[in-house]
Amino acid sequence: MRIVIVTPAAAGSRHGNRHTAARWGALLRALGHRVRVEVEWDGAPADLMIALHARRSHDSVVRYALAFPGRPLVLVLTGTDLYRDIRSDADAAESIALATHMVVLQEAGLKELAPALRARTQVIYQSARRAAAQAPLEGCFEIVVSGHLRDEKDPFRAAAALSHLPRGSRIRITHIGGAMTPDMARAARRWSEREPRYRWLGELPHGAALRVLGRARLMVISSRMEGGANVVGEALAAGVPVLASRISGNIGMLGARYAGYFPVEDERALARLMWRAESDPAFYRTLTAQCRNRRGLVAPRREREGLRRLIARLGKNLSRNP
């Protein structure tokens, strides 16, 4: 099949949507398809469009649906789609109406959709390859925060939790991720200046970011909304336990009974979990074991098989009208 993948994240970007598009392109090519990845559809014929982000890919979705009304159009719903835009944005709603099929990136995402929409939606977890094990830093209990600095990520919650730790704690926060606005960059620098246990590294190449993650004792994801975070999958693959805000997207990744959740925007609760993970070996082992049990969800073979099943399902109804 000729497949075009549309993502609002430009080539060279380290946004999660771009990672997903590039990885799916490679997986689909390995399955024998011809794949183009574009920021906006260029109008060239394709047997199938896969569009990431209902609101931001809306123009491409509309134009493709008008040009090839008999052909399948898959919409991949992101976190801002699922937990905000589909309830309030007309463009996002129209993209959903035009899509013949949809994909969510973790199982709890299905609950955000009306029953009629669930019937044409498939869950495909994003995969992450196991990075080489790294020796942890000596002299501290390093916790990594990995993600771009933007409001949806609540990026400084772990930094704010540091002041609520007991005096004997050896926790240090290493923050990886580019600032999406000058204000976010200034905020990160201010946190670094006033809190010696917090260090912002900015945006790193993907391999370097994985090496930092691989040496960490924990990863914190404090987001207000997530569709199915790549960084959680990377932590699972690396064997790094996670402390996560209790939101649907994180629950879909880590499971309803996971022991490492804290309420959204609650740095005191996060600090208690951080300290417990540092000071209570049994609790740390529980987190590690629970994450290990979820590792299979992010295996590359599972994602490849999910895409294969999706394409097989679409191919049965594929129109080859020019």
Image (cartoon, rainbow, N blue to C red):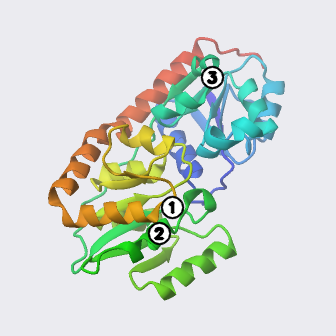
Disc on the earlier residue, 1 or 2: 1
Give the crowd class for mark 3: few <14, some 14-19, many >=20 residues within 10 Å. few
Q: Residue 176, which numbered label?
A: 2
Task: Give residue 108's position: percent from left, percent from top.
Answer: 48, 33
* Picture coordinates of residue 312, whole percent (x, y): 52, 18
**Nearest-to-viewer mark from 3 and 1:** 3
Q: Residues within 10 Å of mark 1 (few under 14, many from 20)?
A: many
Q: Badge 3 is on which residue? A: 114
**x, y (%) of residue 110?**
53, 28
From the viewer's perspective, tell me whether residue 108 is left or right of residue 2: left
Q: Which label sits in the foreground, 3 or 2?
A: 3
Residue lying at 51% horizontally and 36% vertically, measured from the top left: 29
Q: Secondary structure at mark 3?
A: loop
Q: Which residue is mark 1?
A: 147
Q: In the image shown, does 113 or 68 lie closer to the viewer?
A: 113
Q: Quadrant of residue 267?
A: bottom left
How many numbered badges does the structure rendering display?
3
Location of residue 6 by image quarter: top right
Is 32 situated above or below 216?
above
**For the residue marked with disc 2, what is the amino acid?**
Ile
Q: Is residue 198 above or below residue 64?
A: below
What's the distance in space between the residues labelled 3 and 1, CA to CA?
30 Å
Q: Residue at x 78, y 40 (%)?
A: 89
Circle 1 SS class: loop
Q: Nearer the viewer, residue 82 or 275?
A: 275
Q: Nearer the viewer, residue 21 or 265?
A: 265
Q: Which mark is residue 310?
A: none
